[in-house]
Amino acid sequence: FRVHISPLKGSHEERMGVVGLLTDVTERRKLERMRSEFVANVSHELRTPLTSINGFVETLLDGAIEDPTLAKNFLEIINAEGKRLANLIDDLLKLSRLEDRRTKLNKQPVDLAEVINNTVKMFEARATDKNIELTTALPQEMLPVPGDQGFLSQVLVNLVDNAIKYTLPGGKVGIEVTYSQEEVTVAVSDTGIGIPPESLPRVFERFYRVDKARSRDMGGTGLGLSISKHIIEAHGGKIRAESDQEGSTFSFTLPLHD
Ligand code: ADP
């Protein structure tokens, strides 16, 4: 609480009492703290690839450039870290536009079967390489859902990408669609490493990762789920995560009618 006390005076300046004002600043302090934590996180996330790029460039300039094999190796790292930096900046811009609602959805009837089949095509090779079985279970009749196809594709790509990323070779990833009277639910399930119960409520937070090093090594920015949540909520839907030792399921529900 912030306390503000001022004297209450009468018409002849005589003191009649005091006025006390108590302002509840809990919410404001919380927002300020969240903002400064976010800025600290962003700076750290941007610094990490940059430090690595600078380090390798310096080593090259110090003479490593004379050794072609070593030089190629270093340049590949610089290239990968540069891409990571670009991905991170793209994700940050996307998130900030979604957060302050500057992003306008281009809503049209979306054919979810098409979105799902395109996503599967996109990940087929990667799943096969990792010996992961990628399957879909779609109802015979798929009703169109009002939404922004580009953004909905992005959510699906994020969820399938994570499912493959966090599942060991030999595992399975499935996409299932179910309808109720009012809603459609898309669930992406995996037989992966799972998420500990204490982390589950936090996975949609910006930059939250169960295992920071592992996520970074896999090329993750820690923003995918946060972006997905904003997209689904902008559609009037809900996204949720469930997980146990057998694996995880991320599902989102969208209203069928505007
Ligand atoms: P990242 O870029 O790190 O994957 P996300 O926002 O997509 O960021 O996910 C946040 C964290 O949630 C991940 O770092 C990972 O720890 C956890 N996570 C997300 N999806 C899965 C999954 N299918 N299985 C296990 N853990 C997951």
Image: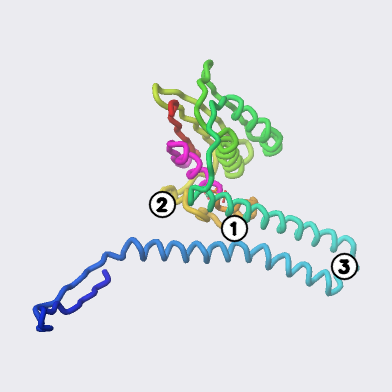
* Mark-to-mark CA distance, 1 and 3: 29 Å
* Mark-to-mark CA distance, 2 and 3: 47 Å
Choose mark 2 or mark 3, whichever is in front.
3
Residue at horizontal 53%, vertical 63%?
Answer: 41
**Mark 3, residues whose alpha carbon is within 10 Å: few (<14), some, or many (≥20)?**
some
Stretch of the chain drawn in magenta: 224-246
Can residue 104 be seen?
yes
Residue 48 x, y percent position in the rendering: 64, 64
**Residue indicated by mark 3:** 65
Residue 36 x, y percent position in the rendering: 47, 66
- Name the colour scheme: rainbow
Q: Indicate yes or no: mark 3 CB to ligand 1 under 8 Å.
A: no
Secondary structure beneath dot 3 equals: helix
Going by the picture, which residue comes out furthest to the front? 11
Nearer-N-terminus badge (2/3): 3
**Residue indicated by mark 2:** 198
Residue at horizontal 65%, vertical 30%?
Answer: 118
Residue 164 x, y percent position in the rendering: 61, 40
Nearer-N-terminus badge (2/1): 2
Q: Which amino acid does label 2 sit on?
A: Glu
Q: What residue type is labelled 1?
A: Ala
Choose mark 1 or mark 3, whichever is in front.
3
**Mark 2, residues whose alpha carbon is within 10 Å: few (<14), some, or many (≥20)?**
few
Secondary structure beneath dot 2 equals: loop
Q: What residue type is labelled 3?
A: Ile
Can residue 242 be seen?
no
**Residue indicated by mark 1:** 213
